[in-house]
């Protein structure tokens, strides 16, 4: 009895966690009629048409592509700028070093809601509303501070002998960074990269304000929009299919990299 | 060499500084100024109204609803999440002959528990909208299946149930992550401490109170800050899941939602900025309180 208690507790929360997710996946294979009359039954003959409808008619495929473009671009820009700044501040001494560090890092303590209104007008003034470029630049701007904060301490812990040897061999500062230090910082880059990817992939507030053209909706926007509009068309099965398609890339990535992801996310939190 | 160093530093820092200045620093600075004006979005037509917007906030019943709801979320969500997370993390460590090792299948549990943390709150909100659906939802379906038809409700339509329903979603989405975090903290506690406690005749509860809890305190504190910031937000879940959104009758209104609507539906940008400033000071107070609580004595492990 005493030995069983932990397992009972763990199983209970496991069911609470997994059940709604499995239910959504199963419902995506049912007809609307089955969903309405019997939410608990298993799908009798799988309705793959739901998935096709969600992908095509409901534009989930398009939104997925938008998300990939925006998040991919923003992630590359964030990692490049963030690691350059973190490295320059961690390994070079110059006047204003501390000041620049705090200028970046203090931004982490401001809620994005505070910036929302002026940000909208800044982006509008630059003619970047409803564009991929605008969203990429803003995403990167808000992801750089944490990246700098995380990688700054990481670059500090790296030994300097290798870099010194490279300098003696005639490497330029840029070459030392890209060819020597960046490869050495790989574990830190992976951790913060995963953290940034998830944060950007799941970003909802910024696109809600800066990206209101339905053709350029990112995945979460499209899904939210679908869940509102399905109230009129009551295409339940299509919405379940859309939700499942949206969850699938995350699930696949998690199964493949789950140890890295858990390590990266928890390291990000205790930093 | 000197010259190359300067050029490298400029090249490394300048692009990021420009991006930061344009999209982060300048909006934050402008927000404080705008909060003192009655700006409605027309260039050059912002009148200075001093603290007028803030005085208006005090009498804005919708905003006060939002403040109250965020305060309730702040009081409930972190506490419940951390309690559940700690409970599950210690259950996970009640295995082995001495009852001090991870139980069988601990890895598998962690994998499943962690998954919701990876999903966007948008997806979670859409999912739970279905779960709470009064006719076809999973929750009422489950209640009916076990004969508790009387307990089936319109979870998101009843004013007294809507906010708890939203908070349950926030707890559901983060318990697993904090369980994994606390579990890692427990793994880092030296085993000798538990062995000594065991020799002294401590039971599980005493070991949790006297050994585990004091040694995971720092992690718990970090969790409080993160969950607190999340509880001050709640925008995505409220905006997608609730009727209105923010209803019924302001029962699930949150500050972010009021701000967003005030700015981008009603075009009252000055007034919305004042809400942003209020939100900023709420977050700042939270952070300062958490830091001060952390200044108490630390336990050093030699």
Image (cartoon, coloured by chain):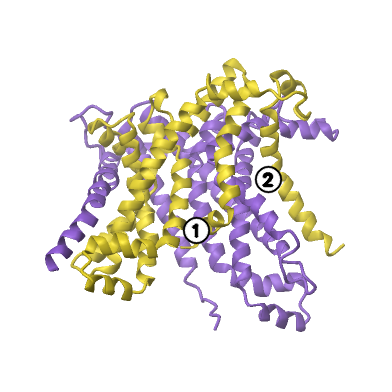
Chain colours: A yellow, B purple
Q: In the drawing, does residue B272 fall left or right of residue A17? A: left
Q: Quadrant location of the N terminus of chain A?
A: bottom right
Q: Nearer the viewer, residue B56 or A29?
A: A29
Q: Is residue A132 above or below residue A165?
A: above
Q: Secondary structure at mark 2?
A: helix
Circle 1 chain:
A
Give the image quarter of residue A247.
top right
* Badge number at residue A220: none
Could you say where residue B23 lies in the image, as x and y percent from the top left? 28, 43
| Label 2: how many Cα within 10 Å (few below 14, some 14–19, many 20+) | many
Q: Secondary structure at mark 1?
A: helix
The tag earlier along the polypeptide, 2 or 1, is: 2
Give the image quarter of residue B32.
top left
Could you say where residue B49 lies in the image, as x and y percent from the top left? 25, 37
The residue that appears at 57% across and 24% down in the rendered structure is: A54
The residue that appears at 46% across and 57% down in the rendered structure is: A191
The residue under label 2 is A17
Cα–Cα gap, marks 2 and 1: 21 Å
Circle 2 chain:
A
Could you say where residue B234 lies in the image, as x and y percent from the top left? 51, 41
Q: In the drawing, does residue A33 fall left or right of residue A243? A: right
The residue that appears at 76% across and 62% down in the rendered structure is: B104
The residue under label 1 is A269
Q: Is residue A75 above or below residue B266?
A: below
């Amino acid at each position: 009895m005493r030995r069983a208690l932990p397992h009972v507790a763990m199983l209970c929360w496991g069911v609470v966690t997994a059940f709604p997710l499995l239910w959504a996946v199963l419902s995506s294979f049912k007809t609307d009629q089955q969903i309405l009359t019997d939410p608990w039954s298993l799908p009798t003959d799988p309705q793959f048409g739901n998935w096709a409808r969600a992908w095509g008619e409901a534009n989930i495929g398009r939104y997925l592509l938008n998300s990939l473009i925006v998040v991919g671009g923003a992630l590359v820009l964030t990692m490049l700028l963030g690691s350059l700044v973190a490295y320059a501040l961690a390994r070079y001494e110059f006047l204003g070093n501390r000041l620049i560090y705090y200028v970046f890092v203090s931004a982490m303590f401001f809620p994005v809601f505070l910036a929302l209104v002026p940000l909208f007008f800044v982006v509008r003034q630059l003619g970047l509303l409803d564009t991929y470029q605008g969203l990429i630049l803003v995403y990167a701007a808000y992801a750089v501070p944490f990246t700098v904060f995380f990688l700054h301490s990481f670059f500090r812990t790296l030994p300097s002998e290798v870099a010194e040897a490279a300098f003696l061999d005639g490497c330029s500062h840029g070459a030392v960074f890209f060819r020597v230090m960046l490869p050495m910082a790989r574990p830190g880059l992976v951790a913060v990269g995963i953290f940034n990817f998830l944060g950007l992939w799941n970003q909802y507030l910024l696109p809600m304000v800066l990206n209101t053209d339905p053709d350029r909706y990112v995945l979460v926007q499209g899904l939210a929009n679908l869940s509102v509009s399905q109230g009129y068309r009551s295409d339940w099965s299509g919405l379940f299919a859309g939700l499942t398609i949206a969850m699938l890339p995350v699930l696949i990535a998690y199964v493949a990299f789950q140890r890295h992801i858990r390590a990266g996310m928890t390291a990000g939190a205790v930093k | 060499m000197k010259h190359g160093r300067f050029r490298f530093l400029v090249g490394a820092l300048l692009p990021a500084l420009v991006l930061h200045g344009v999209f982060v620093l300048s909006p934050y600075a402008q927000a404080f100024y705008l909060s003192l004006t009655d700006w409605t979005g027309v260039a050059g037509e912002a009148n200075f109204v001093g603290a007028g917007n803030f005085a208006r906030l005090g009498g804005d019943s919708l905003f006060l609803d939002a403040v109250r709801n965020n305060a309730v979320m702040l009081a409930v969500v972190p506490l419940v999440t951390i309690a559940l997370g700690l409970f599950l993390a210690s259950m996970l460590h009640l295995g082995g002959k001495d009852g001090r090792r991870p139980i069988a299948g601990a890895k598998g549990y962690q994998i499943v528990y962690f998954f919701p943390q990876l999903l966007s709150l948008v997806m979670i909100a859409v999912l739970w909208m279905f779960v709470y659906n009064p006719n076809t939802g999973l929750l009422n379906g489950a209640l009916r299946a076990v004969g508790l038809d009387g307990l089936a409700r319109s979870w998101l339509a009843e004013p007294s149930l809507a906010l708890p329903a939203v908070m349950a979603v926030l707890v559901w989405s983060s318990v697993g992550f904090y369980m994994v975090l606390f579990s890692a903290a427990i793994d880092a506690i030296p085993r000798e401490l538990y062995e000594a406690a065991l020799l002294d005749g401590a039971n599980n509860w005493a070991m949790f109170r006297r050994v585990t809890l004091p040694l995971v305190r720092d992690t718990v504190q970090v969790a409080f800050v993160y969950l607190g910031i999340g509880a001050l937000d709640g925008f995505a879940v409220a905006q997608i899941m609730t009727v209105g959104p923010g209803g019924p009758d302001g029962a699930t209104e949150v500050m972010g939602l009021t701000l967003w609507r005030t700015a981008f539906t009603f075009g009252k940008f000055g007034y919305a900025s004042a809400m942003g400033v209020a939100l900023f000071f709420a977050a700042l107070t939270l952070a300062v309180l958490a830091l001060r609580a952390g200044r108490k004595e630390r336990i050093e492990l030699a």
